[in-house]
Amino acid sequence: MIDQDFTESLLSRFKSVTKRHHEDCLTLECDSSEVAELLFHLRDEETFDLMVDLTAIDHGELAEIRFSVVSHLYSRIHRDYLRIHSICGDNESPSFPSVSSIFPAANWHEREAYDMFGIHFTDHPNLKRILMWDGYPYYPLRKDFPLAGIETPLPADDVAEVTQASVDPAPMMGGPFVSTTDGNMSDSEPRAKDESWTE
Amino acid sequence: MSTKTVEVNVGDVGARGADASHQVDGEKMALNVGPSHPTTHGVLRLMMDLDGDVITRCEPVLGYLHRGDEKIAENMTYNQFVPYTDRLDYLAPLANNVAYAIAVEKLTGIELPERCQAIRVLVSEMARISSHLLGMGVFGMDAGAWTPFMYTFTEREKLYTLFEELTGARFTTSYTRIGGVARDIPEGWLGRVTHFCENLPKAIDEVEKLLTRNRIFLDRTEGIGQVSKEDAIAYGFTGPNLRASGVDLDLRKDKPYSGYEKYDFDVPIGTRGDCYDRYLIRIEEVRQSLRIIKQVIDDFPSGLWYSEDAKKIFAPPKDKILTSMEELIQNFMIVTEGPQIPAGEVYFEAENPKGALGFYIVSKGGGVPYRLKIRAPSFCNLSILEHMVPGHMLSDITVILGSLDFVMGECDR
């Protein structure tokens, strides 16, 4: 298990690393410039060699620091996880140093974070969209992106030209927390109100 | 009509013909497999460059089954998300339900009664058996052996009948709730599970007779898709695929959850990490799951199937809602505002049939998660393809994909 000594040696070794309140596993905060060094150390010296997850959080449009990157490591020796929070500088065009050269597993995780949040991972070998199609104009997991989606051209131009179709937002009426507020309650029953379901 | 005769020097290039050999000499052929193709087990697309029959580049393209589960999770209450977890690894929905429920419970700090934990272990292991049965059967089919699939599918069908009896659904079970399970086990159900478990080894033996020493199967799988211990760790392999490469990591042993520490079972480890090892690991895991199920049933605890601490999360019994004011209010609050989960963050991984399924939940309090990240084992297990596939023959692709045993519903989320 991870003990006090382990944490303190990390804190003294890396200047920008601080400990954060945690409930389940040791949580560190680290400056983005020192993340690569910290991960190298954790992988080679401290047996945290399995990168299980890397993802991002959008703290909202109005937040002072909008994006942060969270990675989870697992050590088979300590039999425990370790979480690293890092802030992404620049809310408009966030960027973060890629760690895929240290952990090849991070390659796809970073592509996903880029795809969903628009975080640019510098020095990533193949930074392009992974779940959405190439050329998709939005970043869906950002908080300002609506759940229903936004009307977007089809990925295939030739199909779009023939069918005149586009990717439409999903009908939200009747979904969780969605009802009309005006009129009486029976009018805002999902099936009575939403005509789009029945053409 | 005049005919023209061209003399062709067959030589090395075989049927291509001498003229053609000039054109394709050193040139690579692009081949696209999928997204809808039997070997890709769903909607995975592979863009490959071939030099003759040898693959020189393989680029997986994902996202054809992307439904935005993480975005959806941010817009609904914790309880409402349970059915969405069915649709991750849809070959083992019960195991996903359990993993998600435990993640939220860890955030809340709910302790579960022993009976609930035992039920969860039981259904997780049954889900593992059903997933591995399909995985092995389909793997055999990918390697050209049709018959084992018939045996495993028959057994899987019996399991699904048991699931239906327990949860009301064969596939989309949605069985767990935050703080318990939806309902107690039906009367006599454990006896039927025991009956199934007594008969399963016979079917597994049949499959083993057909595959394990089958010359053709061995030739197609041995030494193919080999993943070294180092690569397996570096690319974030988990589950049977990781253990086939010789890494001893099973979260049921290393970080026991839901009372797994009470049961005695072995973790099979491979030595070479090739397709054949991955098959053997799954066969053995089915046998070990049967051992766990037997122990659970032999010592099945009595008591409640939900936690009494989870008052603000778990809906009270229906008869109480209809007769008692407090329970009525409680139910109303759970339905309208969602269960009240304290602020904080949690990461929980469960050892699912496909690998470690992780949920990273960031809560700011209230009934809706602020961010819910699903760490899908299939997603991580597939990321090695780019590195592992080049150098293999085109015909090996089916075997490699079959042995990795992935599900695109989980990969694309």
Image (tube, coloured by chain):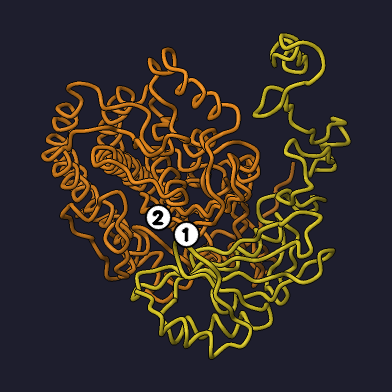
Chain colours: A yellow, B orange
Report whether A95 appears left or right of B75. Answer: right
Q: Residues within 10 Å of mark 1 (few under 14, many from 20)?
A: many
Q: Position of residue B13 (x, y in %)?
A: 55, 67
* Residue B219 in sight here: no
Q: How many marks?
A: 2
Q: What residue is shown with label 1?
A: B381
Q: Are marks 1 and 2 in contact (CB under 8 Å)?
A: yes
Chain to which mark 1 belongs? B
Locate the C terminus of chain B by quadrant. Answer: top right
| Residue sitting nearer the eye, B360 or B308 | B308
Compare marks 1 and 2 and give the one earlier in the sequence. 2
Q: What residue is shown with label 2?
A: B355
* Residue A148 in sight here: yes
Q: Could you tell me which residue is drawn at 44 percent across and 87 percent down?
A: A45
Q: Could you tell me which residue is drawn at 60 percent across and 69 percent down?
A: A85
Amino acid carrying label 1: it is Asn
| Residue sitting nearer the eye, B350 or B16 | B350
Report whether A160 appears left or right of B2. Answer: right
- Quadrant in which residue A98 is drawn: bottom right
Q: Position of residue B279 (x, y in %)?
A: 30, 55
Locate the N terminus of chain B by quadrant. Answer: top right
Amino acid carrying label 2: it is Gly
